[in-house]
């Protein structure tokens, strides 16, 4: 969700139980501006909140000119002081998936994971226990990266890819129409395309290269992992991810207003196939 | 491309009768190329460019070079929309308008109310001050939009006007995949509920009769009936007791009609504990799961509401107390009735937010594994049934089962079970910057989305979420029961081995021998007979 106008935009997701207290709103209004200025970001996003047992993490992200490059993630526990999170490399993300349970709220907390490995082959095999320590800070950054990869979405045509490869906000985007916004095919995963190249050429023939450079959420597995609802009749569209419960996207049809936010425990819903 | 001369060279085209210089020839060729209409849209570049440049010069935007594509796009788009609307004055009644008209009714005052200006100031209304409660929740970043709360409040008012209610509370909101549920928790005035129930029951009984008749018809043929009798299921608890202490109404959108949820029976509670399904938002949707759930989504919703209430409805210690008179009457039985403590002084916010959790108590009865709040003995009932039917047959009576016991009412939440090694509740202050004026908030870790606040003498519980219990480990569905044993294996039903040809031949030889011997004997006898004759 765009940091600018956050206090207005946050109202659009209020019906999902996502609200900020007046104190938090005021604090964020002040601190996000400073954060943006100090880091020379083009845009700053309020990403959401990850609830821990003792404390919560508030997350903000900033980007430069290109939306897909150099995205930096910050966390804060009081909405005022922001700390930079380490980048989520593949090794960190793989390791963090081993951690289970809720976040505690202390970034220096270490999760313990015991892995049993077999050494040697055949009859000589001996089991050896290896303890892996996972720092909560690392887990936080990888969960954010996972959520961004799995569920962060934008309406189609809200962003364009320029001939130089930069991804920038499309200034001629005028919002989806009501009928378009009810279709999952009008929303794209806001990440580098992973599945687009696997599509048959025939399907790709009619795509606009400047607009359709990301994957569409219609083909997400399992089908039904998005809950699409109209609120106020058709005045507001809310898309909730059931895979990452707490991820909520809104769009006001026929306007440029859209955004998404994650308010949750930071745990992926692995039970999803049983629950549909 | 020779676009630059277009603006200057607006003089009328010279007919090509006169001789032309090479330069002019070039120019005419280029212009006729630009004037070629596109086969797709019928537009030509010449007109388009002149329109774009006209617009640029008219509007004079900054940094034209950067946004020229947008302007060009825009100009093209505007060409398609015809300015004259062929269907004039067509009113588009979208769903948005339809809902707004539905909700408009909420804002109108009831008929007759305007005539009597506030006559019932003294009469206590069961309607809660939802806005005040919502204000406190908002301090802790919990709740819904203010506008939404107002709409819910008006909808609750509507509910109070149409039903004889003693107590009403906004229970919370359950998110579904297609629609959401707003849940209101109500208590009827004494005796009034029965009246309403009777009306409903009348309809029910007629339906049941139909069903029974249908069954009889099919059972005309003599079908062998199995001897197996399923063990008796625990009976439903009466209204106003146990899990059915409160009645719940739900609606999908404030302004839409409130629907009363059916009372919950213990089997539904125990099955609901074993399954994890999303709500769809349609009350009549089937619940497809294993073990099979009896009833549709309205029953499942009611069961989850009962479980959430039992697990997360908490109040500050001392706000409620047991009725002293009743205490003496009942002995042994778990007390299920409490009254508001009028002398309650309030607990300081610091103490309420203390991590020891001793200052909060549950004020909804714990649901036993059986699915009831008060334990029901399954054995004694079955005994009566069997004694009448077959007294001679001695059945192995199962041992008297151990009664299930849960924590009594008003137990401090400090005694709650841990959730995967962490505390079941997270206490918090609403503000760290101005702690003097903050309120105490409790977040449930067992039922994510359940919250409670307390401040001076006020407290409230709310639930906003998907209606699922938290589990650290992944959900695994109940496995199907083990395959039943068919027969005890014994000699009667074991298949013997077939005889080999040799054995058969030996048997045949033996039989033949015996037959021959018998014949000889007969012959000998006959001879003897003949001799005698």
Image (spheres, rainbow, N blue to C red):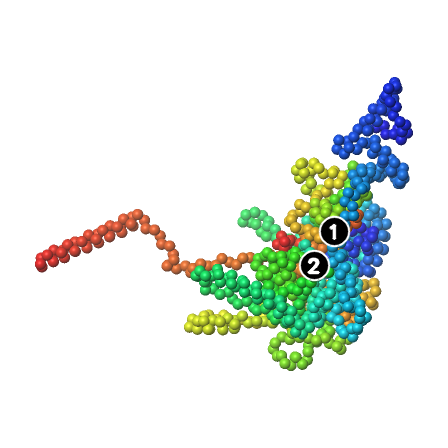
Residue B246 x/y as whole percent: 66, 69
Q: How many marks?
A: 2
Residue neighbourhood size for the residue with mark 1, other residues' Cα within 10 Å, grouped as few (<14), some (14–19), many (≥20): few
What is the distance, in whole Å, between disc 2 and disc 1 at their CAs?
A: 18 Å
Q: Is residue A181 visible?
A: yes
- N-term mark: 2 or 1: 1
Q: Residue at x 68, y 46 (%)?
A: A218
- Read off the residue under disc 2: B252
Residue B176, quarter of the rendered image: bottom right
Where residue B449 appears, x then y in whole percent?
71, 61
Left or right of B292? Residue A27 is right
As displayed, is residue B385 above or below residue B95?
below
The one of A87 and B128 positioned closer to us in this rendering: B128
Residue A67 appears in the rendering: no
Q: In front: B410, or B170?
A: B170
Q: Secondary structure at mark 1?
A: loop
Disc 2 crowd, CA 10 A, few/some/many (<14, 14-19, 20+): many
The residue located at (84%, 27%) in the rendering is B31
Residue B99 position within the rendered picture, expressed as x and y whole percent measured from the top left: 74, 56
Which residue carries the number 1 mark?
B94
Q: Is residue B17 left or right of residue B278?
A: right
Of residues B454 and B16, the one nearer the viewer is B16
Relative vertical location of residue B150 with respect to residue B80 in this rendering, above or below: below
Q: Which residue lies at the image location 58% right of the left edge and 61% below the top edge?
A: B294
Q: Chain of mark 1?
A: B
The disc at residue B335 is none
Circles 2 and 1 on the same subunit: yes
Q: Determine the residue located farthest toward the top in the rendered image.
A: B19
Determine whether the residue tagged by mark 2 lies in a helix, strand or loop: loop
Q: Nearer the viewer, residue B489 or B367?
A: B367
């Amino acid at each position: 969700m765009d940091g600018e106008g956050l206090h207005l935009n946050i109202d659009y997701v209020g019906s999902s139980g996502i609200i900020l207290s007046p104190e938090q709103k005021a604090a964020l209004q002040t601190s996000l501006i400073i954060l943006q200025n100090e880091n020379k970001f083009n845009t700053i996003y309020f990403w959401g909140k990850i609830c821990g047992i003792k404390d919560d993490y508030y997350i903000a992200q900033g980007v430069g000119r290109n939306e897909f490059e150099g995205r930096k993630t910050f966390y804060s526990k009081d909405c005022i002081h922001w700390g930079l999170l380490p980048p989520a490399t593949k090794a960190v993300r793989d390791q963090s998936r081993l951690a289970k349970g809720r976040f505690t709220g202390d970034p220096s907390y270490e999760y313990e994971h015991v892995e049993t490995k077999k050494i040697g082959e055949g009859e000589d095999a001996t089991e050896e226990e290896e303890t892996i320590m996972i720092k909560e800070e690392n887990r936080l950054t990888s969960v954010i990266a996972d959520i961004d990869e799995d569920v962060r979405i934008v309406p189609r045509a809200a962003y364009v890819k320029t001939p130089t490869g930069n991804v920038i906000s499309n200034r001629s985007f005028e919002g989806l129409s009501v009928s378009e916004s009810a279709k999952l095919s009008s929303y794209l995963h806001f990440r580098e395309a992973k599945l687009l190249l696997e599509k048959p050429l025939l399907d790709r023939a009619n795509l606009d290269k400047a607009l359709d450079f990301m994957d569409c959420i219609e083909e997400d597995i399992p089908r039904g992992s998005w809950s699409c609802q109209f609120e106020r009749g058709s005045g507001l569209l809310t898309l909730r991810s059931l895979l990452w419960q707490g991820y909520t996207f809104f769009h006001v049809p026929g306007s440029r207003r859209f955004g998404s936010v994650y308010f949750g425990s930071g745990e992926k819903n692995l039970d999803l196939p049983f629950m549909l | 491309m020779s676009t630059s001369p277009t603006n200057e060279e607006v003089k009328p085209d010279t007919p090509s009768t006169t001789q032309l210089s090479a330069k002019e020839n070039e120019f005419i060729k280029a212009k006729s190329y630009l004037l070629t209409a596109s086969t797709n849209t019928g537009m030509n570049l010449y007109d388009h460019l002149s329109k774009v440049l006209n617009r640029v010069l008219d509007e004079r935007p900054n940094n034209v070079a950067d946004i020229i594509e947008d302007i060009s796009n825009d100009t093209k788009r505007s060409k398609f929309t015809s300015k004259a609307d062929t269907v004039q004055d067509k009113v588009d009644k979208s769903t948005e308008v339809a809902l707004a008209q539905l909700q408009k009714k909420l804002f109108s005052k009831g008929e007759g109310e305007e005539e009597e200006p506030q006559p019932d100031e003294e009469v206590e209304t069961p309607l809660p001050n939802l806005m005040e409660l919502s204000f406190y929740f908002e301090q802790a970043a919990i709740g819904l939009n203010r506008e939404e709360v107002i709409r819910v409040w008006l909808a609750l008012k509507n509910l109070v006007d149409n039903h004889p209610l003693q107590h009403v509370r906004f229970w919370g909101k359950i998110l579904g995949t297609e629609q959401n549920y707003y849940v209101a928790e109500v208590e009827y005035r004494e005796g009034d509920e029965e009246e309403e129930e009777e009306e409903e029951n009348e309809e029910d009984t007629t339906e049941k009769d139909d069903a029974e008749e249908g069954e009889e018809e099919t059972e005309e043929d003599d079908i062998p009936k199995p001897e197996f009798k399923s063990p008796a299921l625990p009976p439903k608890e009466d209204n106003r007791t146990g899990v059915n202490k409160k009645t719940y109404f739900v609606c999908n959108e404030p302004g839409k009609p409130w629907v009363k949820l059916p009372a919950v029976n213990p089997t539904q509670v125990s099955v609901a504990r074993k399954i994890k399904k999303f709500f769809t938002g349609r009350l009549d949707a089937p619940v497809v799961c294993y073990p099979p759930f009896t009833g549709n989504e309205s029953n499942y919703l009611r069961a989850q509401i009962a479980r959430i209430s039992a697990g997360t409805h908490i109040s500050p210690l001392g706000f409620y107390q047991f009725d002293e008179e009743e205490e003496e009457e009942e002995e042994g039985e778990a007390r299920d009735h409490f009254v508001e403590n009028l002398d309650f002084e309030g607990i300081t916010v610091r103490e309420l937010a203390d991590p020891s959790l001793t200052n909060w108590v549950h004020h909804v009865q714990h649901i036993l594994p059986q699915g009831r709040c008060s334990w029901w003995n399954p054995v004694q009932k079955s005994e009566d049934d069997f004694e009448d039917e077959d007294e001679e047959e001695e059945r192995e009576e199962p041992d008297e089962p151990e009664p299930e016991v849960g924590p009594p009412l008003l137990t401090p939440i400090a005694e709650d079970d841990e959730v995967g090694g962490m505390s079941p509740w997270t206490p918090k202050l609403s503000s760290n910057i101005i702690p003097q004026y903050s309120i105490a908030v409790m977040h449930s870790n067992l039922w994510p989305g359940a919250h409670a606040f307390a401040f001076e003498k006020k407290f409230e519980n709310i639930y906003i979420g998907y209606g699922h219990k938290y589990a650290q480990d992944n959900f695994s569905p109940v496995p199907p029961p083990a395959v039943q044993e068919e027969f005890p294996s014994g000699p009667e039903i074991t298949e013997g081995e077939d005889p080999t040809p040799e054995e058969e031949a030996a048997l045949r030889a033996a039989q033949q021998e015996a037959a021959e011997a018998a014949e000889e004997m007969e012959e000998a006898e006959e001879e003897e007979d003949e001799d005698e004759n």
